[in-house]
Amino acid sequence: MRSTRSCVAFLLTAALAPALAVAAPGKAIDPEKIFARKDADSDGFLTVDEYKKGMKEEQLEKADRRFKKIDTNGDGKLSLDEFKAGMPKPKQ
């Protein structure tokens, strides 16, 4: 059984797949740039609709559940800190 943290990391990786796919090989992913691209109204938070932006159909099926897990304070939006905390850690 996977831990909650590893499940969230896995699910967030799936959610970010479109953004990750455009990164140059060997180049680090910048969560702040991904967040800024998704933050359509530039208010510093992601709504669930902004979070889903750019996801593939199969990713959308689980996006609401992922969003709720990442939204640790339960306010219905993701701060940059919540978004970054939910991102998978780079392998070393």
Image (spheres, rainbow, N blue to C red):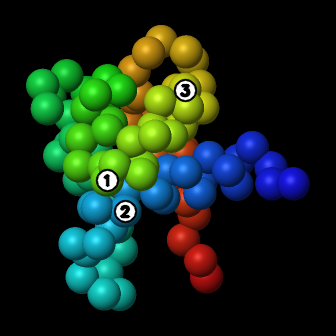
Quadrant of residue 83 in the image? top left
* Mark 3: amino acid: Lys
Relative to 71, say whether 76 is above or below: above
Whether residue 82 is visible: no
Disc 1: CA contacts within 10 A as few (<14), some (14-19) or many (>=20): some
Q: Nearer the viewer, mark 3 or mark 1?
A: 1
- Coordinates of residue 42 in the picture (x, y in percent): 14, 28
Q: Secondary structure at mark 2?
A: helix
- Of all residues, the one furthest to the left in this rendering is 41
Disc 3: CA contacts within 10 A as few (<14), some (14-19) or many (>=20): some
Pointer 3 residue: 68
Whether residue 17 is visible: yes
* Mark 1: amino acid: Lys
Image point (54%, 45%), residue name: 86
Quadrant of residue 40 in the image? top left
Nearest to N terminus: mark 3 or mark 2: 2
Relative to 76, say whether 58 is above or below: below
Pointer 1 residue: 56
Nearest to N terminus: mark 3 or mark 1: 1
Image point (47%, 30%), residue name: 64
* CA distance separating discs 3 and 2: 19 Å
Name the foreground residue: 34 vs 13.
13
Q: Secondary structure at mark 1?
A: loop
Pointer 2 residue: 17
Q: Nearer the viewer, mark 2 or mark 1?
A: 1
Name the foreground residue: 76 vs 90.
76
- Coordinates of residue 57 in the picture (x, y in percent): 34, 49
- Coordinates of residue 7 in the picture (x, y in percent): 68, 50
Q: Secondary structure at mark 3?
A: helix
Disc 2: CA contacts within 10 A as few (<14), some (14-19) or many (>=20): some
